[in-house]
């Protein structure tokens, strides 16, 4: 009998010593991060994913579990639940929309797993459900787009607006910032506003509809991102007008495609929104692992790129 018990103890000890069988690989200092990305809807998102993946690859102590939600909230909720079940050390995600995450964030908190918000915010009653937010001030980005129009004298114009994903923080806040500034200029009128879901195809399709009903009236397009603006440029050309001249276009992100369009004279201004959040994301992860406190909000410094700066600036752009 004693021999059987001894053998069982040896077998159990061997299993527990197998790598990865200790329930957590924390013992070797590895930090496991579960990241739920929205999707690959725009050049901005692709650059954001590249920034996160490449930064994780540079840090040997980071194990990144990456999940692409294909712009579906239910996939993000599923991914977060999987991360909890796997017992990751940190959860990070870019919420596709602001609402509907309260329950799963509470599950993460109950499991003792800190959550970092990357790029987009959530609208929850209890701010203790997330540790920090890092990204841009979308309201200011909307203000900057409107201010650029006013500085250039476009103050008696009929405007069409391509909104981002319905219910997303950037769409809600960019619209809010833009309206906050134009409200003091009664000659600036938004005659149509609709979501193109941040994609080139969505921007083209909605701009075609705007042109069909209001083509002769439209003076300005305000697009919540460059990808929709690039799609709209195609629609404007197919309609027989000159984008950047017959219709003035201001958009947001400052991706490479926007600089190329500005150099061609087809886009007039892009407001910067940096996707390069990888380094600061993993700095926050490592600080958390050391038990250090981190700011509740980390807002990225950004600029505005009008057409006349595009040729000089494009060479130094990182996304
Ligand atoms: C903004 C980001 C937005 C970009 C779009 O930080 O959430 O989502 O403006 C992207 O290009 O799809």
Image (cartoon, helix red, strand yellow):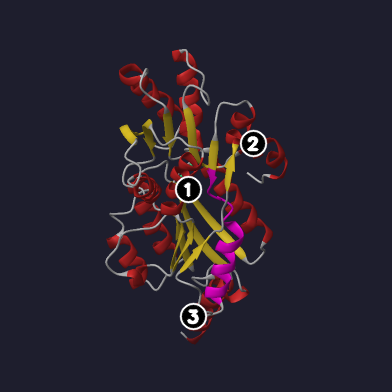
Judged from the image, the secondary structure of the residue bearing numbered disc 2 is helix
The structure residue drawn at horizontal position 49% and vertical position 36%, both measured from the top left corner, is 250
Closer to the eye: label 3 or 2: 2
Q: Position of residue 30 (x, y in %)?
A: 60, 69
Q: What kind of element bears circle 1?
A: helix
The reply to whether residue 94 is in sight is no
Circle 2 crowding by C-alpha within 10 Å: few under 14, some 14–19, many from 20: few
Residue furthest out toward the bottom: 2
Total residue callouts: 3
Q: Nearer the viewer, mark 3 or mark 1?
A: 1
Specify whether 259 is left or right of 209. right
Query: Does label 3 point to a residue whose CB lies under 8 Å from ligand 1?
Result: no
Of callouts 3 and 1, the N-terminal one: 3
Q: Most prominent secondary structure in the magenta stretch? A: helix
- Residue at label 3? 4
Residues tagged 3 and 2 counted as in contact (Cβ below 8 A): no
Towards the viewer: 164 or 246 = 246
As drawn, 125 above or below 99: below
Quarter where residue 208 is shown: top left
Label 2 residue near ligand 1, CB within 8 Å: no
Report which residue position mark 2 lands on.
308
**Residue at mark 1:** 144
Q: Which residues are magenta?
A: 271-289
Q: In which image quadrant can residue 60 be found?
A: bottom right
Q: Horizontal and vertical percent for residue 231? A: 48, 27
Q: CA distance from mark 2 to mark 1?
A: 17 Å
Spatial distance from mark 3 to mark 2, Cα to Cα? 82 Å
Q: Is mark 1 within 8 Å of ligand 1?
A: no
**Residue 276 colored magenta?**
yes
Task: Specify the label residue 270 is tagged with.
Answer: none
């Amino acid at each position: 009998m004693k021999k059987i018990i001894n053998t069982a103890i040896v077998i159990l000890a061997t299993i527990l010593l197998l790598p990865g069988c200790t329930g957590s690989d924390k013992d070797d200092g590895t930090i496991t991060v579960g990241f739920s990305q929205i999707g690959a809807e725009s050049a901005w998102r692709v650059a954001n994913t590249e920034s996160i993946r490449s930064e994780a690859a540079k840090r040997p102590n980071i194990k990144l579990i990456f999940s692409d939600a294909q712009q579906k909230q239910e996939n993000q909720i599923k991914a977060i639940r999987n991360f909890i079940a796997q017992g990751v050390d940190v959860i990070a995600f870019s919420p596709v929309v602001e609402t509907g995450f309260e329950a799963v964030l509470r599950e993460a908190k109950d499991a003792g797993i800190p959550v970092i918000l990357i790029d987009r915010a959530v609208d929850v009653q209890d701010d203790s459900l997330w540790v920090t937010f890092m990204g841009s001030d979308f309201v200011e980005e909307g203000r900057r787009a409107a201010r650029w129009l006013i500085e250039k004298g476009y103050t008696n114009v009929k405007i069409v607006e391509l909104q981002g994903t319905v219910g997303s923080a950037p769409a809600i806040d960019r619209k809010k910032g833009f309206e906050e500034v134009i409200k003091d200029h009664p000659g600036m009128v938004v005659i149509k506003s609709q979501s193109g879901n941040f994609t080139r195809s969505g921007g083209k399709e909605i701009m075609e509809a705007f042109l069909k009903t209001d083509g002769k009236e439209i003076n300005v397009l305000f697009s919540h991102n460059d990808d929709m603006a690039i799609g709209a440029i195609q629609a404007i050309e197919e309609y027989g007008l000159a984008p950047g001249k017959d219709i003035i276009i201001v958009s947001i992100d400052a991706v490479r495609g926007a600089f190329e369009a500005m150099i061609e004279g087809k886009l007039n201004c892009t407001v910067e929104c940096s996707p390069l959040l990888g380094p600061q994301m993993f700095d926050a992860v490592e600080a958390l692992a050391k038990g250090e406190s981190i700011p509740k909000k980390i807002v990225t410094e950004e600029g505005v790129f009008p057409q006349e700066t595009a040729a000089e600036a494009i060479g130094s752009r990182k996304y």
